[in-house]
């Protein structure tokens, strides 16, 4: 299905572009979340008039992401986990736990898919990359300590 993106989406395209996606993805996620419109003749003809609104919305999202980046980029966060004597964690730390931690510490709602890291399985310092919007990313330093 051809859709017109109303905002920039990772791995899909920039705001205002016409892209092909699977029908289910368009019907169940993009269109209900108001992230895209069906690319029919009427919407394509109206695209030029909608581009100003799409660009304004895109600029707002970029500004918001830049503000969040300035707040959290380079910050140090700590987490205590159970670990064995060798420093290996019982379990692991993944994007979902980091998302919850960001929500609690910074009141930042971030989709776990936008947290770029492999599961962490050891104590120590780790750098986490957060994709805030389009090409805007922030890095956090995560310190995992052994729970006493």
Image (cartoon, rainbow, N blue to C red):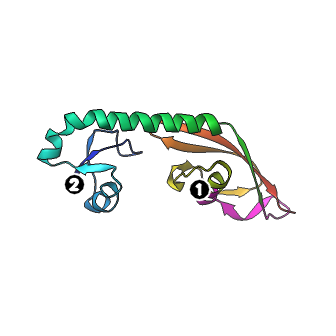
Whole-percent x and y of residue 114?
51, 49
Location of residue 33 (image quadrant): bottom left
Quadrant including the N terminus = bottom left
Q: Residue at x 66, y 55 (%)?
A: 104
Location of mark 1 (residue): 95
Is residue 140 shown left or right of residue 144? left
Q: Residue at x 66, y 42 (%)?
A: 140
Can you see residue 136? no
Q: Residues within 10 Å of mark 2 (few under 14, many from 20)?
A: some
Q: Secondary structure at mark 1?
A: helix
- Whether residue 84 sits left or right of residue 130 in the image: it is right
Which residue occupies the foreground of this view, 147 or 42? 42
Give coordinates of residue 81: x percent, y percent.
77, 61
Q: Is residue 4 visible?
A: yes
**Residue holding disc 2:** 1
From what the image shows, is residue 56 above or below residue 24?
above
How far across and down, in percent of the image, does residue 80 sit?
78, 58
Residue positioned most to the bottom = 90
Residue range (magenta): 81-100
Dot 2: what SS? loop
Quadrant including the C terminus: bottom right
Which of disc 1 and disc 2 is earlier in sequence?
2
Q: Residue at x 80, y 63 (%)?
A: 83
Residue 140 within the magenta-colored segment of the rendering: no
Q: Classify 10 Å Cα crowding around label 1: few (below 14), some (14-19), many (20 and above).
A: many
| Separation of residues labelled 2 and 1 (CA atoms) | 30 Å
Residue 16 lies, in percent from the top left, at 28, 38
């Amino acid at each position: 299905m051809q859709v017109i993106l109303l905002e920039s989406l990772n791995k899909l395209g920039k705001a205002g572009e016409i892209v092909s996606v699977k029908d289910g993805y368009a019907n169940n996620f993009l269109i209900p979340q108001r992230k895209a419109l069906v690319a029919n003749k009427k919407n394509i003809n109206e695209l030029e008039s909608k581009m100003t609104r799409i660009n304004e919305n895109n600029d707002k999202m970029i500004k918001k992401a830049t503000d969040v980046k300035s707040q959290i980029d380079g910050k140090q966060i700590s987490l205590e986990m159970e670990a064995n004597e060798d420093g290996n964690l019982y379990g692991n730390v993944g994007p979902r736990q980091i998302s919850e931690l960001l929500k609690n510490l910074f009141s930042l709602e971030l989709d776990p898919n936008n947290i770029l890291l492999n599961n962490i399985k050891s104590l120590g310092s780790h750098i986490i990359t957060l994709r805030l919007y389009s090409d805007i990313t922030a890095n956090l330093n995560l310190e995992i300590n052994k729970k006493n």
